[in-house]
């Protein structure tokens, strides 16, 4: 990957720096770059996890903008910096993502987002990318990586179950099948029968889902699945029985707030970042408050990737990813570089009006 503004050598003239050109990358270009490249994107995300685990990122806590008159809505800012002076393609930036659940009643997606990429030398933004596809993609790639790494050392799951039947569930299925998974059966459960039916139809059209069953409750789906994805908008735990997981499934707890503390205490728990995941009323946060410690967290996905942590067989394993801004930067940078290589960047020549300090 190339950097828009290369860092000058120590002692170089500061006036050699220039304002980088500013590009807009719309959703159609983002989707075109990412389509069919699931394995490559998983590698990009895993490398971002390794950089984060090595301390070569900056990933402050997310900031939540909430509204007294719209309590179900929120807009989240995820600032981040990926890499350092030794890292090719290092980048700073911000994801600005809105979640307005009422949108679905109007037939439009709940989430919308933009991703801003900043030049690490001048600080100038050099790109604005449509961010909802990038956000869903990095979430799905993270889930696919976790499914692979956490299922090693145990029978490979063949029965997939989705609790929550929205866009994220669809992306995760795409990334699982795109990285070599196949399933004998797929189960779907959603509190919205229309959503469950919609995901079932989508999976059946894909031709890669095996037998698809819509379940009438979470318990039936959980007991019938050995790889379970929680991708809901739940604000508090609604799954409270550890006995539902007695068959020791791999659980991708993407939506973070579905499982009661007693479920996590009966499982091996892997997170993406301990400090991030144990806040904001997540299931992990509630478990920390209940126990007064973090001993129930066994490690991070980077720990598993690097071999520092081995997931034991004989009990459920739960992956709870808070969703790191550095992953958005990694995927966004990948998209930007691919569009730039194609020669199709949409440059806004006069976006920055004042480009000389004294005019």
Image (tube, grey):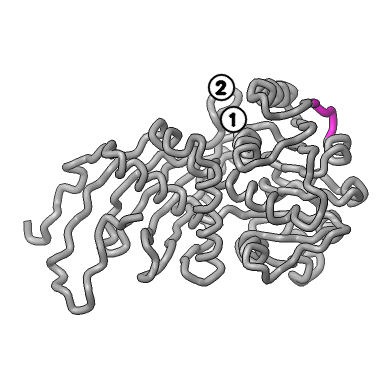
Position of 353 with respect to 268 (left or right) is: left
Decide whether residue 216 is among the magenta residues.
yes
Report crowding for label 1: few under 14, some 14 to 19, many 20 or more residues within 10 A (C-alpha): some
Q: Residue 55: x percent and y percent? A: 51, 71
Please tell me which residue is depicted at 59% across the width and 27% down the height of the picture: 104
Q: Residue 74: x percent and y percent? A: 54, 43
Asked if one can make out residue 69 in the rendered structure from this viewpoint, the answer is no
Report crowding for label 2: few under 14, some 14 to 19, many 20 or more residues within 10 A (C-alpha): few
Please tell me which residue is depicted at 12% across the width and 67% down the height of the picture: 15
Please tell me which residue is depicted at 64% across the width and 56% down the height of the picture: 280
Dot 2: element: helix
Find out whether the residues at labels 2 and 1 contact each other: C-beta distance under 8 Å: yes
The total number of labels drawn is 2
Image vertical order of residue 303 relative to residue 166, above or below: below
Locate the C terminus by quadrant: bottom left
Q: Residue 28: x percent and y percent? A: 40, 31
Position of 176 with respect to 347 (left or right) is: right
Observer-nearest of 267 and 314: 314
Locate the N terminus by quadrant: bottom left
Residue 149 got which mark?
none
Which residue is label 2 attached to? 106
Which residue is label 1 attached to? 102
User: Farthest left residue?
Assistant: 359
Question: Quadrant of the rendered structure where residue 319 is?
Answer: bottom right
Write down the region rendered in magenta: 213-217
Dot 1: element: helix
Please tell me which residue is depicted at 75% across the width and 28% down the height of the picture: 210
Asked if one can make out residue 169 in the rendered structure from this viewpoint, the answer is yes
User: Farthest bottom residue?
Assistant: 11
Q: Residue 262: x percent and y percent? A: 86, 57
């Amino acid at each position: 990957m190339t950097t828009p503004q290369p860092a000058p050598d120590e002692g170089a003239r500061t006036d050699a720096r220039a304002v980088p050109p500013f590009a807009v990358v719309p959703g159609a270009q983002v989707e075109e770059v990412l389509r069919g490249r699931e394995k490559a994107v998983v590698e990009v995300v895993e490398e971002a996890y390794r950089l984060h685990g090595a301390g070569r990122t900056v990933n402050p806590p997310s900031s939540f903008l909430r509204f007294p008159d719209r309590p179900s809505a929120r807009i989240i800012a995820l600032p981040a910096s990926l890499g350092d002076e030794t890292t090719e393609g290092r980048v700073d930036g911000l994801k600005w993502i809105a979640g307005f659940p009422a949108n679905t009643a109007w037939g439009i997606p709940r989430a919308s987002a933009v991703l801003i990429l900043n030049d690490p030398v001048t600080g100038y933004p050099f790109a604005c990318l449509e961010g909802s596809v990038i956000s869903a993609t990095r979430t799905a790639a993270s889930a696919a990586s976790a499914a692979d790494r956490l299922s090693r050392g145990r029978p490979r799951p063949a029965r997939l179950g989705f609790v929550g039947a929205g866009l994220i569930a669809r992306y995760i299925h795409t990334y699982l099948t795109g990285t070599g998974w196949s399933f004998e059966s797929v189960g779907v459960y959603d509190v919205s029968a229309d959503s469950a039916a919609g995901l079932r139809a989508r999976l059946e059209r894909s031709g890669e889902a095996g037998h698809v069953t819509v379940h009438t409750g979470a318990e039936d789906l959980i007991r019938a699945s050995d790889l379970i994805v929680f991708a809901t908008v739940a604000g508090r735990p609604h799954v409270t029985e550890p006995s539902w997981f007695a068959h020791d499934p791999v659980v991708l707890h993407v939506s973070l707030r579905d499982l009661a503390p007693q479920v996590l205490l009966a499982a091996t728990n892997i997170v993406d970042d301990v400090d991030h995941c144990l806040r904001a009323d997540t299931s992990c946060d509630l478990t920390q408050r209940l126990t007064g410690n973090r001993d129930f967290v066994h490690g991070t996905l980077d720990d598993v990737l690097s071999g520092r942590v081995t997931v034991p067989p004989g009990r459920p394993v739960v992956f709870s990813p808070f969703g790191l801004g550095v992953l958005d930067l990694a995927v966004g940078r990948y998209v930007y570089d691919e569009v730039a290589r194609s020669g199709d960047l949409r440059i806004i020549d006069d976006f920055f009006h004042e480009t000389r300090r004294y005019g």
